[in-house]
């Protein structure tokens, strides 16, 4: 079947599970919009490129679940993109190193700060200097 830039999304989504060219046309049609949406939320070009690629990978894997009666294809992609952005931010946040967290703790000289900054300190070693609450 010959497809043109005017081929309706519905026809392309129906054919995408068995026709990579149909999905490629959807990618060509919507990749820039998805990228702009993701970039606006993340503010980082490399992250936006990665998340956009993830969105289309997930979309292709789940194209059989897309229901045109419930949403336009771009609306479905937009929801996938919004969820991918949230997942990306959560993953980045949880990947923060303990060193970065400790660098943010002010060194006020208290026993708690000293114990927290000493990675080999045990509770028993820190307890004698701790101030009771």
Image: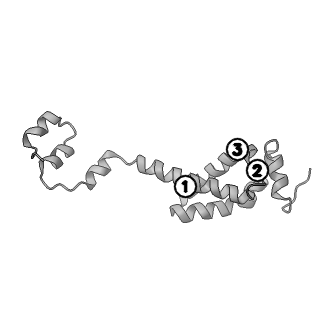
For residue 44, the mark is none
Q: In which quarter of the image is residue 39?
A: bottom right
130 or 39, nearer to the observer: 130
Image location of residue 107, percent across then percent down: 17, 54
Question: Percent from the top left, x then y, of residue 79?
Answer: 63, 56
Instruction: Name the foreground residue: 96 vs 127.
Output: 127
Q: Are marks 3 and 1 in contact (CB under 8 Å)?
A: no
Q: In this picture, is 127 found above or below 94? A: above
- In the image, 33 versus 67, the foreground residue is 67
Residue 111 vertical position relative to residue 121 in the rendered view, above or below: below
Quarter assignment of residue 46: bottom right
Gap in angstroms between the C-alphas marked 3 and 2: 11 Å
Which of label 3 and label 2 is nearer to you? Answer: 2
- Tag in front: 2 or 1: 2
The answer to whether the residue labelled 2 contacts the one labelled 1, judged by CB atoms less than 8 Å apart, is no
Q: Where does the image place residue 48, in percent across and percent down from the top left? A: 56, 58
Dot 3 or dot 1: first in sequence order is: 3
Q: Name the residue under label 1.
A: 85
Res. 10 visible in picture: yes
Q: Residue 67 carries which label?
A: 2
Which type of secondary structure does the marked residue at label 3 adopt? helix
Q: Which residue is drawn at 74% across and 55% down?
A: 70
Q: Where is residue 50 in the image (x, y as percent from the top left)?
A: 57, 52
Q: How far apart are marks 3 and 1 (CA)?
A: 18 Å
Mark 3 closeness class: few <14, some 14–19, many ≥20 residues within 10 Å: few
Question: Seen in the image, is 11 located left or right of residue 129?
Answer: right
Write the residue at 45% across / 50% down. Answer: 92
| Element type at mark 1 | helix
- Which residue occupies 30% across, 47% down? 99
| Residue behind mark 3 | 62
């Amino acid at each position: 079947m010959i497809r043109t830039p005017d081929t309706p999304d519905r026809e392309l989504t129906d054919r995408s599970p068995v026709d990579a060219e149909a999905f490629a046309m959807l990618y060509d049609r919507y990749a820039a919009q998805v990228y702009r949406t993701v970039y606006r939320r993340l503010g980082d070009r490399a992250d936006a490129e990665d998340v956009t690629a993830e969105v289309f990978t997930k979309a292709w894997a789940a194209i059989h679940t897309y229901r045109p009666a419930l949403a336009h294809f771009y609306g479905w992609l937009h929801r996938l993109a919004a969820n991918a952005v949230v997942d990306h931010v959560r993953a980045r946040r949880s990947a923060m190193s303990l060193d970065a967290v400790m660098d943010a703790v002010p060194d006020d000289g208290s026993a708690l700060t000293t114990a927290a900054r000493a990675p080999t300190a045990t509770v028993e070693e820190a307890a004698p200097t701790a101030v009771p609450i």
